[in-house]
Amino acid sequence: MRPPMPPTPWSARMPIDLPFAEARAYAHGRAPAPLLDLVGAMAGQAAATGASLGVFEALSRGPRHAEALAGDLGCDPSGLARLLALLHTTGYLELTDHGYGNAPVAAAWLCPPATYGHVLRVWQAVLGELWADLAPAIRTGRPRGDLTAWLAERPEVSIPFQSLQRGLAQWLAEEVAWLVPLPEGPLRLLDLAGGHGAYSLAFCAVHPGLTATVTDLPEALGEGGHGRVEWRAADPLLDPVAGRYDVVLLCDVLHGFPAAQARRLVDGAVSATVPGGRVVILETVAGARAGVAETAFTAGFDLNLWHTQGGGVLDVPTITGWLASAGCGPIEHRDLSRSATHTLITARQPWRTL
């Protein structure tokens, strides 16, 4: 599960904007630092609730007093007033004589067309429900698992989750497609567990002679409508791949599976590639390029993968080792400029000699 994490606009006023002396007291243990985490959790819940109620979108049209805004949104005035007060004290809203208005951070990230309101709502549900039994899972080594089944029962979470997955893929796919050189002429591409097909569509846009097949579970498949892209229902772990392909993609897929299954997916991708063809893997990795906030988010993402899918964030040596064991070479990797936490790994299926 990978809801996108846009870079933080440090030029804007940040939630919980502590004065230097107060921040120093927390940093040096003279004040209870866990209080900041508690307030941050409250602020995240409040921001997600505000996005769900339409607070930030309504205020993008101009400041409003709590009572008037409650009438516009069909909310209880007393409850909404308290929510607005919390959003103000945590830096999401400003308060003037004209009422509440969006602070720069809310205007930049929580008003359409920005999607961070959806990100917060998805994680609100994940943390509130799936992480409720995190302690016994860690104690026993039996994580909750089956994020897919959980999402299937919650369309109010599944719809924004799928939308966010697709949006992140579309943002990254353009760069990925340009970073993978392919020969001219008719080529066949297989997008394993490709769901929405964003990566296949990007490769087809860059390479006019390319046709693509996207395979995934039926509930994860995107809609058709592109003449050179075919969507086909298949279980990436159980169903054998039909045919051989010049390019095989595994983009943001491996981290959602236990290590043994992820390695089987890599082996399957290599087996489905023609001699001289390319295997292309895009994955989230923890690395020195990421900032403090991104590094912390990746650690949380890794824990969530373990608890909800049995997977986890992989490192580059592990993935390149699997490719080498499957017979690929040479193997190259490079970091994406659009994401400090994504690395692109490409490998060539060697030509076979008699």
Image: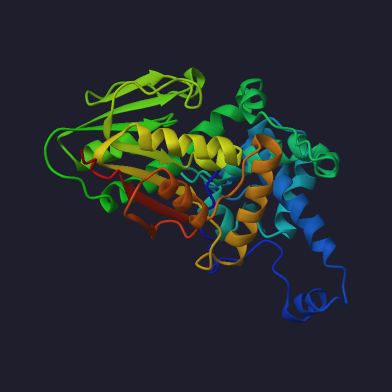
- Residue 265: percent from left, percent from top: 47, 35
- Residue 149: percent from left, percent from top: 65, 23
Residue 330 left/right relative to 110: left
Task: Using the image, determine if residue 322 lies above or below residue 26.
Answer: above
Can residue 6 be spotted in the picture?
A: no
Residue 243 in which image quadrant: top left
Towards the viewer: 312 or 267: 267
The residue depicted at 30 percent of the width and 43 percent of the height is 349
Q: Residue furthest left?
A: 185
Residue 206 left/right relative to 26: left
Towards the viewer: 143 or 195: 143
Residue 85 left/right relative to 210: right
Quadrant of the image for the C terminus?
A: top left
Towards the viewer: 82 or 299: 299
The residue depicted at 31 percent of the width and 54 percent of the height is 330
Residue 314 left/right relative to 276: right
Residue 52 in which image quadrant: top right
Give the number of marks. 0
- Residue 270: percent from left, percent from top: 37, 38
Task: Using the image, determine if residue 62 lies above or below residue 263.
Answer: below
Quadrant of the image for the N terminus?
A: top right
Task: Using the image, determine if residue 297 lies above or below residue 325.
Answer: below
- Residue 116: percent from left, percent from top: 55, 46
Residue 194 in which image quadrant: top left
Task: Using the image, determine if residue 339 lies above or below residue 196.
Answer: below
Can residue 251 be spotted in the picture?
A: yes
